[in-house]
Amino acid sequence: MERRDRTFVALARPRGRPGQTKREDTLVEQNTHDGLIGARVRRKEDLRLLTGRTQFVDDVALSGMLEAAVLRSPVPHARILSIDASEALEHPGVYAVVTGAEVKAAVSAPQPVIWRMIPDQLIPDGYPLAVDKVRYVGQGVAAVAAKDRATAEDALELIDVEYEELPPVATLEDALAEDAPKLYEDWPSNVSGSTTIPKGDVATAFADADVVVSETFRFARQMGTPLETRGVVATWDPYTDQLDMWLSTQSPNLARDLLGEVLGISVDKIRVRTPDVGGGFGNKFDFYGEEIVAAILSRRTGRSVKLIEDRMESFVANAHSREQKIDVELAATSDGTITGLKATVYAVLGGQLGTVGIGPCWTTAALMTGPYDIANVELSVVGVMTNRSPYGSYRGWGQPKSNFVHERMVELLAQRIGMDAQDVRLKNFVPPDAFPYGSPVFFYDSGRYADCLDLCRKSVEQAGWLERRDKARADGTAVGIGYSFHVEITAFGPSRILNMAGLQHSGFDEEVVRIDSTGRVTVYTGQSAMGQGVQTALAQVAAQSLGVALDDVTVVVGDTDTCPYTGYGTGASRAAAVGGGAVLTAATRLKEKVLRIAGQVLEASPEDLVVEDGRVSVAGAPDKSISMAEIGDASYRRMNGLLPESESPTLEEREVFDPANVAFSYGCTAVLTEVDTETGEVRLLDYLIAHDCGTVINPLIVDGQLHGGAAQAIGGALYEELVYGDDGQIQTTTFMDYLIPTASEIPPFKLEHMATVADHIPGGFKGMGEGGTIGGGAAITHAVEDALSDYGVSITSLPITPPRLLAAMRAGKDNR
Amino acid sequence: MTGKVTVTLKVNGRTYSADCEPRKTLADFLRQDLGFTGVHLGCEHGVCGACTVSIDGSTARSCCMLAVQAEGTEITTVEGLASDGNLHPLQEAFWKHHGLQCGFCTPGMLATACELLEDNPDPSEDEIREGISGNLCRCTGYQFIVDSIHDAARQLRSTS
């Protein structure tokens, strides 16, 4: 356990932008594109994926490889009295069994918690498998390596664990009860820590307010649920100490560093490779105990060990997210100006802290003002341990809850003072001339929120939703329209500022762009591919910057031995912005060298040269030209007389980009919905997002990200819930219980785009992987409330399941 | 589990024979014993549809069948959909319309879409959505998958 004394440092105004208050050039429209940046091109990744020529982690097969399985706790809270694995060890085909105590003895450090934003937070030492005590159903207690998975699972049944059960702390209320059983007996309570983000003078704001609106919101446990579960193939050579990991991760460089920390070896001994990754959504950003278990089993057996989580395990072993209770109070004047916001976010953490600790819940508080300029805030977060699975990363990372809170509060304020909610939004938006804008924690770089809201409303009108609603209502059907407005933090982020916020890692990005001896281009990136199209996006940036065809660019990802270092990992909507920005700079510099070489050969000044489709020519004299292939040959092979004496051989540039600031994308979501007033079932009829993520690299990819993000918002708003019983047992362990929306539940999507560039990122890219997920819950809720306006329904928790909605309808009627 | 049984079946036009434990699923047999790793396992309890293959002309979830049950059948996996270096019109359409992101659901989605278009060459959007509602995709939000199938249907109708 660790106690820390560190004062929270409010994040400083980004350096490099002294005195800047208004920048007209942040408002530059970039809606027209004549090059590959902004082109709707099909993806380079797809041919392999479409024809089954992929290699996901479970497809990795090494000679002599063993397969492992983990024995998991069937009880939520218990002391481990003994573990007898002798029978399992005797089982034919079993090579090794390890227990939690043995794993603890074999590691140098507990599982890392990299986000530490609360001074004095109690951070328990967690190990890959439980030691002495189990604190959630599904926590690993022992693991087996055997000739195949089936044999390993057979052997699990032969391990005898004796538990002394303790009373479970099943819920937030259980955990905070005065006489609550304690998960960590030497702690004063189940509270891991708390902190408050202040701004302005909240007491005066509330004392002077014309209106105060209070509400409590609850969010169910959910998870990212990539269709491919997590997995690892570890080869740890007992003689050379070389550790070779195939890992389905979004953060190979981070994983390599954390493997080194935990296993006590230097990172030069560690290679992390990522095969094809079948969706990440944050779940595969985090660093799990299974990675360590597989490595230790490999070292013990002297063989490669594969450990693949099966789906049922994933419901307890994969990071859980979203679960929070938030108490909110909003102060306003009678004209709708929001003057103060107070909130306490109760983070319903699990039995152990995950890789990102309380990070997502802190972000909920840090970004709770959303797009609104609120002068006085007091935003607190309280981390509470419960006997549930550890809390971790999931797309949106706290922001869906911030968004739900500020959008619900805006609507509640509007109802209270009899104003249109859109007018309340417009009145309180950070105005375009206020950027860069200092929110309670982060600086927002640029935005035109009112324009975006307007774009969304116009599109809704053009789509005929108002008429559809009127007609449906005339026919007696409950149909409604709802809106939300979101901001999304992207381009994560300035390393030193992230360190100040408590991150034990960096946020820069490094990219290498190389032209080879045949004139073809390879980009080496530390960013990870998990289906989001990062190879295509970076290839587009490199191709346009160099003046070559897209087909001439290859992007190499997923190997710490050959690819450069990126801080953090691929998450927080950073790959397009920091990766794209770094590739653009590296490629631009490389192009300068190409032009210098071509200038010598063509006897022309580099300034007079143009590069198009892989050929350098003298402007105005197209027959005087040289191909990129010839320049490549001259740079690597036959250079005499071609490569200038002043130039070194090879064509390669490396760029390290640590952004001066994060960036903020934003959008407005509108939803048309129908509610069955008999059953409480919500059906989405139409869905629209107006969105701005700065310069778009590939509209096809951006659209796909918005669709997919919105589908996860819909799942989170209506269907998905990891349910725990009062006994601390999880009750949702299959796709029959945890409802991922299908094509029948998801409506058609319509998108509108605008582009306000990030002027601190080369290329103006902002990133946008999470936007669709953030704004959906509130918009759906508002559409449901609008559809049920006759019932006076007030929705304060997600997901809106039919029984909950029927109860809210009854309560609404009773209140009238 | 000791006794092994021999399973003989045809995959993508070629006959294979291999020994396996009677408890082995068809999905594991295709993946591990025959090397058809285009068959993906997303849940192993018959909900997600990623393991969908075509067996004797009908789709089936290979995670919910035992290999021994497939004795003597003819199976098509995603590896057998394209031929002679030419993509199937559905594969072309998925590529063009961005009908995939991580690609993990794609083999099952393609198998289901193939069968859908054989049964109904001109499906409406609602029919497509219903037709693929047994296949989960966590990345795309389905819109571009629906668009892809729509376009492939048009292509297939115009060439048949």
Image (spheres, rainbow, N blue to C red):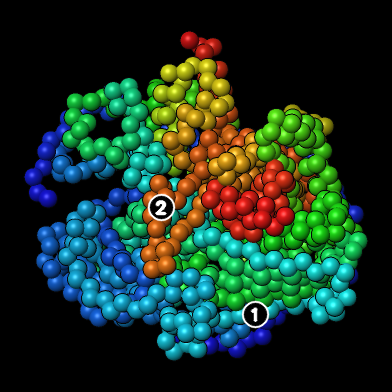
> Residue A197: horizontal and vertical position, in percent?
71, 76
Question: Residue at point 61% right, 41% down?
Answer: A677
Depth order, front residue of B73/A335? A335
Return the chain for callout 2: A
Query: Is A607 on the left or on the right of B15, as rendered?
Result: right
**A177 sits to left or right of A500:** left
Query: Which quarter of the figure has residue A294?
Result: bottom left
Residue in the picture at 21% in, 53% down: A150
Identity of the amino acid at label 2? Thr
Q: Amino acid at mark 1?
A: Thr
Identify which residue is drawn at 53% across, 79% down.
A176
Secondary structure found at label 2? loop
Residue A496, x across and y down, in percent: 67, 74
Mark 1 Cα-neighbour bin, 10 Å: few <14, some 14–19, many ≥20 = many
How far across and how far down the image is residue A205, in percent? Answer: 85, 75
Kind of element beneath mark 1: strand
In this figure, which residue is indicated by the disc labeled 2?
A229
Report which residue position mark 1 lands on.
A195
Q: Are marks 2 and 1 on the same chain?
A: yes
Single out the residue that lies furthest toward the left: B3
Relative vertical location of residue A108 with respect to residue A47 in this rendering, above or below: below
Give the crowd class for mark 2: few <14, some 14-19, many >=20 residues within 10 Å. Answer: many
Specify whether residue A498 is in view.
Answer: no
Q: CA distance from mark 2 to mark 1?
A: 34 Å
x, y percent for residue A276: 44, 48
Chain letter for the residue marked with disc 1 in the picture: A
Q: Is residue A556 above or below residue A124?
A: above
From the viewer's perspective, is residue A298 above or below residue A460?
below
